[in-house]
Amino acid sequence: MTTIDERPSTTVPPKGVVGRLFRAAVTLHTVVAFGQPVFAGVYLSGEIGGLDWHARGADVVFSLGVLQVAVAVAAWVRWGLRWPTAVSVLILVAESGQYGAGLAGLLWVHLPLGVMIIASLAVLSAALWVRPLPDRAATADQAQGASKSRRDETHV
């Protein structure tokens, strides 16, 4: 008979203010970004006001992207992890291109880039909510251990 190894959920409350702020910023950014295709669809269905909603939504999405990068930098300082900042900066760069492509009417760039941004934000949100947030002491110990092992390898 096969048994299933049941483990408790790995989702834990965020550790500290930075963890809660980063999760909140990414979640809000994701939710607002998911509204953008809806606003574009309202415009495409014949409601001329939908284009204005889409333009205002772009301003809000970009502003939330800047906020997300700022909080990600704080997470980098607090946790010692670079990936949240790197991913957030890449998303913000993509949003900058998205914004410019939309203003220029380059739909062949605007639409696929929008899909990529929404998919990236969804994956980032899932990663932040499913995985436990790191503890500052644990990440500092891991960083010291990694640098020590690299030094040992160079002196062989």
Image: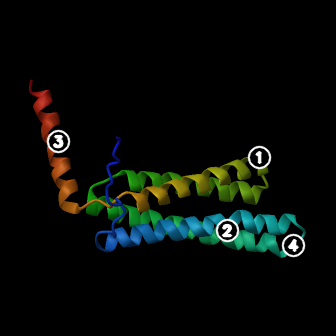
At label 4, counting other C-alpha atoms closer than 10 Å, the crowd grade (few under 14, some 14-19, many 20 or more) is few
Q: What amino acid type should be assigned to the residue bearing mark 3? A: Ser
Residue at (34% x, 59% y) in the render: 10
In which image quadrant can residue 35 be found? Answer: bottom right
Judging from the image, what secondary structure is the residue with disc 3 in?
helix
Colouring of the image:
rainbow
Looking at marks 1 and 3 on the same chain, the residue that comes earlier in the sequence is marked by 1
- Disc ID at residue 61: none
> What separation in Å lies between label 3 and label 2 (alpha carbons)?
44 Å
Of 131 and 87, the residue lying toward us: 131
Image-based side of 4 in relation to 62, left or right = left
Residue marked by disc 1? 108
At label 1, counting other C-alpha atoms closer than 10 Å, the crowd grade (few under 14, some 14-19, many 20 or more) is few
Residue marked by disc 2? 35
Judging from the image, what secondary structure is the residue with disc 4 in?
loop
Judging from the image, what secondary structure is the residue with disc 1 in?
helix
Image-based side of 104 in relation to 34, left or right = right
Residue at (61% x, 56% y) in the render: 118
> Where in the figure is residue 117, as x and y percent of width and height?
60, 54
Residues under numbered marks 3 and 2 in contact, where contact means CB atoms less than 8 Å apart: no
Residue marked by disc 3? 147
Nearest to the eye among marks 3 and 2: give it: 2
Residue at (69% x, 65% y) in the render: 36
- Disc ID at residue 48: 4
